[in-house]
Amino acid sequence: MSRAPALVIVLALLALAGCVDDDSPGGTTSGGSVDVASADLVRLKQRAGMADCPPSTASHPTSDDALPDATLPCLGGGRDVRLSRLDGPLLINVWASYCAPCREELPVLQQVHEAAGNDLTVLGIDYEDMAPAAALRLAADAGVTFPSVADPTGELRADLEVIALPQTVFVDAGGAIVATERRQLTSFDLVADLVDEHLGIALGTDPAARDS
C-alpha cells in the first residue's frame, strides 16, 4: 500500500475541519501516564455495555503495511491489545473526547458495528486523551458498544500517520492496512461504501432504518 503523500498539505486542509492532534488537551505526555482502567472507569464501561477489547493472538506475515507492533491498554479495563496480532478485517477509528467531529461520527460507527456482526471488527483508539472518563461518557452517550484501546501518549502518531481526528483505518484479513480515511464519516451509507471498496464486505442496510 502507498502511504498518503504530502502530509503537510493534508494537515493544513484537515485543520480547517477536524481536530488536529497537536491541539489536544495536554498533548503528548513525556514520561507521564494516564490510568485508563481505574475502578471508576471500569464501572463506566460496564454501565455503557461496551464490549471487551478483542484478543490479539493472530500471526501475520511481516510487511510494510502491517499494523504497528504496539501494545495498548483497553479503555475502561480488560485485556491489552497488541495491534499487530489482531485478526482482520478491521475498521479502526482514531478518536478522542476533545474531538467535536468524533461526537457526530461515533453513532455512525456504532451502526456499522451492529450491521457488520462477525464479518468486521470495529475498534476505537482513544488518542492523546488525558480524560478517559470523558471519553467513556462520550461513547456511552453515543450508544457505542464496540471497544476502544487507549493511546494517551500518541505512541501511534508516526506509524498511523495521525495528523487530525477523526481518522479511520481499514485493515484486511491478513492484518495489512489497505486504506486510511482522514475525514469525518458522516453516514452509514458512506462507511458501508468504503468498507465494500476497501475490504470487500457488504454491510447491508442501516440498522436504524430497519428498526424504524
Image (spheres, rainbow, N blue to C red):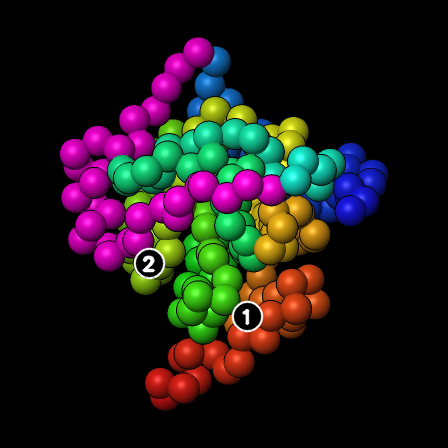
In x, y percent, where is residue 159?
A: 64, 32
- Span colored in magenta: 31-60
Residue 183, quarter of the rendered image: bottom right
Considering only order in the chain, which callout, 2 or 1, is on the residue closer to the N terminus?
2
Q: Main secondary structure of the magenta part?
A: loop
Rendered view: 101 above or below 10: below
Rendered view: 44 above or below 25: below
Is residue 142 visible in the rendered image? The answer is yes
Residue position marked by numbered label 1 in the rendering:
187
Q: Residue at x 55, y 53 (%)?
A: 88
Q: Secondary structure at mark 2?
A: loop
Q: Residues within 10 Å of mark 2 (few under 14, many from 20)?
A: many
Report the mark closest to the observer, 1 or 2. 2
Residue position marked by numbered label 2 in the rendering:
145
> In the shown orientation, is residue 35 left or right of residue 109?
left
Q: Residue at x 66, y 47 (%)?
A: 177
In x, y percent, where is residue 212?
A: 36, 88
Q: Secondary structure at mark 1?
A: loop
Q: Residue at x 68, y 62 (%)?
A: 198
In the image, farthest residue toward the top:
31
> In the shown orientation, is residue 137 left or right of residue 24?
left
Magenta segment: does it hold 37?
yes
